[in-house]
Every structure is written in C-alpha cells, then in structure tokens.
Image: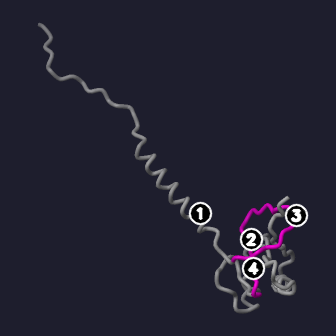
Amino acid sequence: MSSVRYGRRKKRLMAEINVVPYIDVMLVLLVIFMVTAPLLSTGVAVDLPGADAQPLEEDQEPFVVTVDKQGLTYLNDHEEPVSSVEEIQRQAAITLKKNPRTPFMVRGDGAVAYAEVVSAMVMLQQAGVEKVGLATDAMEQ
C-alpha cells in the first residue's frame, strides 16, 4: 500500500505575544499620570520661610496645621479654613489617639505674625501633642 497524502498541511502554532496593545495601555496610563500628578499637590498656598534644616524621614502622613498670610488656619491641605480652635484640637486628639507616632507640623506663611504660628503650636499642645515641628523651605545655596 502506498501512503496517500491529502492536501492539508498541519498549521504551526504561533508562539509570539503581540505587545502593541500593552504599549497602548502604558502610553494611556503615562498620559493620565502626567495630567493628574500636578493636581495631587493641592492645599493652601503659603510662602514658607527658608531654613537650612534637614528634611524629616516620614514613615506616615503628618498632621499639618497651616497658617496663611491672613492668619486663617487650615488642617491637612483642606482648602476651607477651620472655624474654631476646638475643631483643630478635636481632630488632633483623634489623630493622636489613632496613632501616637503621627508627626505634627505647623506650616506658617513667612509674612504672618509670629504670634499666629505660636498659637497654632499651642493649640496642638493643648490637644495633647508633645512634639510639634515647623515646616520650612530648603535654603538654596
């Protein structure tokens, strides 16, 4: 008997990965992150005084009280000022109770009276915070 061949050949499987869709997805994500990155640094604009201080190594997000040029007080990058001292103290006490190792910072505008910054520090101390740091801009040399 002779072997009979039919007109069909076995197709070889392609073992290639098409990476074009992955590149498209990566480019879309890159554009999204480029557009949203500047929006992440929101908050109250203050002109911090410069100082030759070492930056803190933060393991966690700090609790920040900001005092702007007009002497208005803000909490943690919220864009609405806090209406009362009691609200700041209440929020600080809650944060301190949740995590006693939370760093507490005061960001005071360079043009604001020193007494306003000190009163923000006193508010935090009255809420039970033992250590309060002052935020500054790095000095350019």
User: Around disc 2, counting alpha carbons within 10 Å, would you say few (fewer than 14), some (14 to 19), or many (20 or more)?
Assistant: some
Disc number placed over residue 52 in the picture, else none: 3
- Label 4 amino acid? Thr
Q: Amino acid at mark 1?
A: Ala
Locate residue 53: give its quadrant: bottom right
Residue sitting at 17 percent across and 23 percent down? 8
Residue 79, how many percent across, how many down?
A: 64, 81
Mark carried by residue 37? 1
Circle nearer the viewer, 2 or 1 = 1
Q: Residue at x 70, y 92 (%)?
A: 83
The percent coordinates of residue 15 (x first, y second) are 38, 31
Q: Residue furthest top?
A: 1
Residue 138 in the magenta stretch? The answer is no
Q: Which-is-in-front pick, marks 3 and 4?
A: 3
Q: Is residue 115 shown above or below 41?
A: below
**Residue 62: mark:** 2
Q: Nearer the viewer, mark 2 or mark 4?
A: 4
* Mark 1: few/some/many CA within 10 Å (<14, 14-19, 20+): few
Residue in the image at 81% along x and 83% along y: 112
